[in-house]
Image: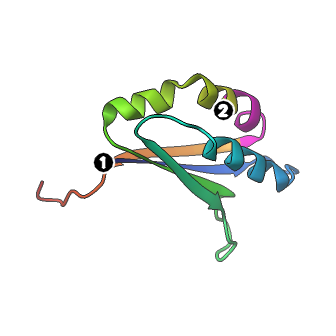
């Protein structure tokens, strides 16, 4: 199992409703082997990013399907990129110890 995490900071002045729009679009993706979750930052600590998306994928092939999916890329291009100040991403294997 692979977990992909993306953390987003928005440009100044972007309305909070945009986060809901982006998350709703991403949550509606139907990609074999991928489950998309995430949410808006709760504001429990200053300086946090605005929201995060966590996608669990059954294997690397599922990650490639998710990464290359036309609707996913439309969401990135049309909804995310115009308002994102920065995006940090990381993919890693779940259920592995340091000794694996």
First to last magenta residue range: 77-84
The residue shown at (74%, 49%) is: 10
Q: Nearer the viewer, residue 62 or 100?
A: 62
Q: Secondary structure at mark 1?
A: loop
Quadrant hosting residue 39: bottom right
Give how far across and how far down residue 97 sits, in percent. Answer: 18, 60
| Image quarter (top left, top right, bottom left or bottom right) of the C terminus | bottom left
**Looking at the image, which residue is at 70% across and 27% down?**
77
Q: Give the quarter of the image for residue 64.
A: top left
Q: Position of residue 47 (x, y in %)?
A: 67, 66
Q: Quickly name the residue at label 2.
A: 76
Image quadrant in which you'd find residue 38: bottom right
The residue nearer to you, when weighing 21 against 98, is 21
Q: CA distance from mark 2 to mark 1?
A: 24 Å
Which residue is under mark 1? Answer: 1
Q: Earlier in the sequence, mark 2 or mark 1?
A: 1
Q: Write the residue at 32% across / 34% down.
A: 60
């Amino acid at each position: 199992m692979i977990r992909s995490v993306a953390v987003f900071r928005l440009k100044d002045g972007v309305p909070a409703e945009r986060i809901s729009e982006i998350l709703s679009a991403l949550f509606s993706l139907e990609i074999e082997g991928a489950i998309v979750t995430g949410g808006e930052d709760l504001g429990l600590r200053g300086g946090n990013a605005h929201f995060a998306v966590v996608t669990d994928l059954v294997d690397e092939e599922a990650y490639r399907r998710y990464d290359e999916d036309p609707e996913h890329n439309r969401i990135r291009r049309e909804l995310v990129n115009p308002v994102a100040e920065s995006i940090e991403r990381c993919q890693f294997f779940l259920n592995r110890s340091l000794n694996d």
